[in-house]
Image (spheres, grey):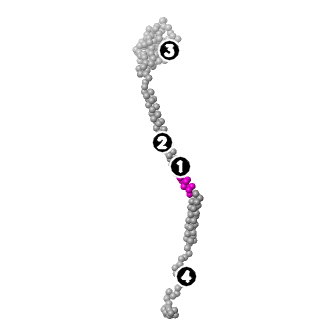
Amino acid sequence: MARKDTEQYQSYAKDAFDNPPEGPVGVHRGNRPMIVRVTPFIIVLVAAVAAGVLFWSIFSGEAANMFNRRSEQTQTTAQTSQGSSSSSAGESASGTASQSSQSATAGESTSAEGTPSQTPSESESAQSTPEESQQVNTNAQITVINGTGVSGDASEWAAALQGQGFTNVTPANPDATTVLPAQTVVYYQNEADLATAQQVANTLGIATVEQSATIGVPIEVVRMQ
């Protein structure tokens, strides 16, 4: 039977399929890169290390410590937040109380200041002096006596008084009966003339104002050197 098959095979003409090429024939893989061949081993090694670390953490209690630390940090954060809230509430309460006390104090001060101790008329009466209670009489008769011996001094002062609104001013020289004082002075007859005499003295810059019953006019100015 085998011989018959061989004869039949040899009886056919040879073609390209009867002369196969030299070398390996069929499907085959070429050489792979080193990284491709090493990658599976690296993955296995990393997985083994991770598994070892996991088991070590579990059995040594390190995992429990990590969870405890996180729990303590969370509690600390919560306590800090509560403390801040309490402090803010305390400051707000103290600020409100302080404002209330300040308002009450301001109200008391206003009440105390708003109550007058004296009526306006009583206060004015207590503070007023005889000079202020009197009126300046610009129409009063005023005589300016020149005791300096320099011609024109009395007229100069008379003009100054007239310039300030006094209408009845007369310059004069001393006569035989005139007693000259040691310094320049303004005399007045009555208490009602005191305010006028003081205004005359202020106008002329005289420091001495005296009452005299011997002068013949309400106001007499004696100018001395």
Residue located beneath label 2 in the image = 89
Circle 1 residue: 76
Mark 1 is surrounded, within 10 Å at the Cα level, by few (under 14), some (14 to 19) or many (20 or more) other residues, namely: few
Mark 3 or mark 4, which is nearer to you?
4
List the residue tagged with mark 3. 208
- Residue that appears at 41% across and 21% down: 119
- As drawn, which residue projects farthest toward the top? 176
Earlier in the chain: of badge 4 and badge 1, it is 4
**Marks 2/1: CA–CA distance:** 20 Å
Dot in front, 4 or 1: 1
Q: Which residue is mark 4?
A: 24
Residue 139 position by quadrant: top left
Q: Give the residues in magenta.
A: 63-75
> In what element is the residue under mark 2?
helix
Q: Position of residue 131 (x, y in %)?
A: 45, 16
Tell me the residue at 48%/12% (across/down): 210
